[in-house]
Image: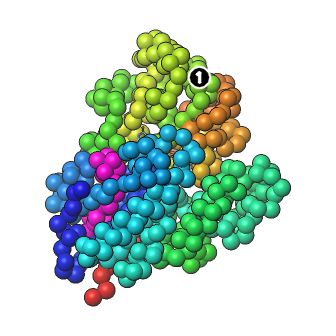
């Protein structure tokens, strides 16, 4: 266990000290580390408390930050009792779950972990002045209350999705249709937005009612909501969220922009499985705005048939692409052979296949990259905006269908690949390909040949940068957050 001397100090803090407890998923751990970086840049003290596997993933980033800036981010890791609820040893992140049903075991294990965190903090006579807890940690508000400090929730979603989320909790509009597949309108929006219940996050699914209720009870008892977004991207929605939830809402993003050195951009959230120099060299050999980057986040994956249709679409498309497949070890041998023969051997100059973890923000910010085929996870969406890259939207599950509405219809910075409905987690038990080769080719062609999406996202890229600069909306919100989290002595 690594322990920060700062964290153990028994004296009361003179400056705000934020304790960040990131939910154990890459899409949360990565932006939470960036949030720590931004808070420290704004002169707050920060401790990130997580598990050994997750701590190891972010330690290089934190060490670099502390060394470069004499910053004040401490990293503490406590044992995660994975085997207590039947998880494999070391299964400390959602992206390490062997199969979806184990998500419930994982959730229960995080509650045991919470007891350990509470004990640890109690024993250490902590001097934190504010806690930022990840969405699934239902025990955080109670812990904060016992410590007498304010508490924020970080869902990892955008303001638009969170506002829809709030409206659904209040109106229960998703419970009205007779079936999970029937479309209904989300009320409270300035436009019609028809969606089916099964395209909503698991919190709105019948099957996870008990957990959803626990999460909602926890969520309504926090003091505020942190959102990785910026005002100009989702105008008015943070305000609507604040009004409807009755909580302070601070938009402080895009947090990925705090990574400015090449190493920080290349080693983010996990160790890249591709040689970064080779990857950049490959991109350097391509024309400006000609490459399509294809990645479905930290858990997005498909069954073999869908992978094949996607791969065939990329081969048939006239544009080169970087294609990331993250859980390669789950693919059958026959598929691995197909990938090797058709991509690594025959077409490596047209398609760069990355098996594992890609240096995503380094790739997105390369001038050759002109489009992003993404599942529209919120981090990937924001990272695309921050890099000025338009999107082919291919949502899989969670809040991604809400994000697509924003991307395609509201902001008009992307085109839809035409997914009908939500997919099972990692494509488990999915036999057929929903998106055909022709759909892939058509969507990429539409995006890469179009000017409007590119123009709009380039404008947003500039606004994203300004938001974090001195006097920008996210900059000021960070300052306000620090005021809010300052010690009351
Ligand atoms: N990511 C990455 N390399 C990969 C896959 C993902 O760096 O090969 C990062 C990506 O930049 C983003 C996060 O992982 O910050 C994924 O978050 P997102 O919200 O997009 O999707 P999730 O994984 O939560 O579904």
What's the magenta region?
36-57
Q: Secondary structure at mark 1?
A: helix
At x 35%, y 24%, the residue is 282
* Residue 69 left/right relative to 362: left
In the picture shown, does residue 466 fall above or below 427? below
Q: How is the image coloured?
A: rainbow
Q: Which of the image's four quarters has the N terminus?
A: bottom left
At x 43%, y 43%, the residue is 88
Q: Is residue 415 visible?
A: no
Q: Residues within 10 Å of mark 1 (few under 14, many from 20)?
A: some
Instruction: Find ligand 1 in the image and state its quadrant.
Output: top left
Question: Where residue 276 sits in the image (x, y, percent)?
Answer: 30, 31
* Residue 197 left/right relative to 221: right
In the picture shown, does residue 246 fall above or below 235? below
* Residue 84 left/right relative to 165: left
At x 61%, y 46%, the residue is 397
46 magenta-colored = yes
Residue 15 falls in image quadrant:
bottom left
Which residue extends farthest bottom? Answer: 489
Residue 418 falls in image quadrant:
top right
Relative depth, front residue between 295 and 288? 295
Residue 121 falls in image quadrant:
bottom left
**Residue position for label 1:** 308
Question: Where residue 63 sits in the image (x, y, percent)?
Answer: 21, 52
In the picture shown, does residue 30 fall above or below 282? below
Disc 1 beta carbon < 8 A from ligand 1? no
At x 23%, y 79%, the residue is 13
Q: Is residue 417 visible?
A: yes
Total label count? Answer: 1
Question: Where residue 365 sits in the image (x, y, percent)?
Answer: 38, 40
């Amino acid at each position: 266990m690594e322990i920060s001397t700062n964290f153990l100090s028994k004296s009361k803090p003179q400056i705000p000290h934020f304790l960040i407890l990131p939910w154990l998923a890459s899409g949360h751990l990565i932006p939470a580390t960036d949030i720590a970086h931004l808070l420290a840049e704004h002169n707050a003290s920060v401790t990130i408390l997580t598990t050994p596997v997750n701590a190891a993933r972010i330690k290089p980033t934190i060490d670099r930050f502390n060394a470069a800036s004499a910053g004040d981010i401490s990293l503490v890791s406590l044992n995660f009792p994975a085997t207590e609820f039947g998880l494999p040893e070391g299964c400390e992140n959602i992206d390490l779950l062997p199969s979806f049903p184990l998500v419930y075991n994982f959730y229960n294990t995080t509650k045991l972990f919470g007891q350990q965190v509470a004990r640890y903090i109690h024993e250490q006579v902590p001097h934190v002045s504010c806690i930022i807890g990840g969405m699934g940690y239902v025990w955080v508000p109670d812990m904060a209350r016992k410590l007498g400090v304010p508490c924020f929730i970080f869902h990892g979603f955008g303001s638009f999705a969170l506002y829809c989320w709030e409206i659904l909790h209040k109106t229960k509009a998703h419970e009205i249709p007779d079936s999970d597949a029937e479309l209904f309108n989300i009320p409270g929006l300035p436009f019609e937005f028809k969606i089916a219940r099964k395209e909503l996050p698991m919190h709105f699914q019948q099957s996870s009612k008990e957990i959803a209720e626990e999460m909602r009870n926890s969520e309504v008892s926090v003091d505020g909501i942190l959102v990785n977004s910026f005002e100009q991207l989702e105008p008015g929605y943070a305000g609507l969220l604040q009004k409807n939830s009755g909580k302070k809402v601070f938009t402080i993003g895009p947090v990925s922009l705090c990574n400015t050195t090449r190493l920080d951009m290349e080693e983010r959230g996990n160790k890249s499985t591709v040689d970064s120099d080779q990857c950049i060299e490959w991109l350097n050999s391509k024309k400006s705005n000609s490459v399509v980057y294809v990645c479905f986040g930290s858990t997005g994956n498909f069954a073999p048939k869908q992978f094949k249709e996607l791969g065939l679409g990329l081969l048939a498309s006239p544009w080169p692409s970087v294609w990331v497949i993250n859980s390669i070890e789950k693919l059958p041998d026959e598929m691995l052979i197909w990938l090797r023969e058709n991509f690594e051997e025959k077409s490596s100059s047209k398609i760069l296949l990355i098996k594992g973890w890609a240096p995503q923000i380094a790739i997105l910010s390369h001038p050759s990259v002109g489009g992003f085929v993404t599942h529209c996870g919120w981090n990937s969406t924001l990272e695309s905006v921050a890099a000025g890259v338009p999107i082919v939207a291919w949502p899989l599950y969670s809040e991604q269908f809400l994000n697509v509405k924003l991307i395609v219809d509201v902001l008009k910075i992307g085109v839809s690949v035409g997914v009908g409905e939500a997919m099972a987690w990692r494509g488990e038990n999915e036999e057929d390909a929903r998106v055909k080769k022709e759909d892939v080719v058509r969507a990429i062609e539409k995006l890469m040949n179009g000017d409007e999406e590119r123009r709009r996202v380039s404008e947003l890229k500039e606004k994203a940068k300004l938001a974090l600069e001195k006097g920008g909306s996210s900059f000021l919100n960070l300052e306000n957050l620090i005021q809010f989290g300052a010690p009351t002595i």
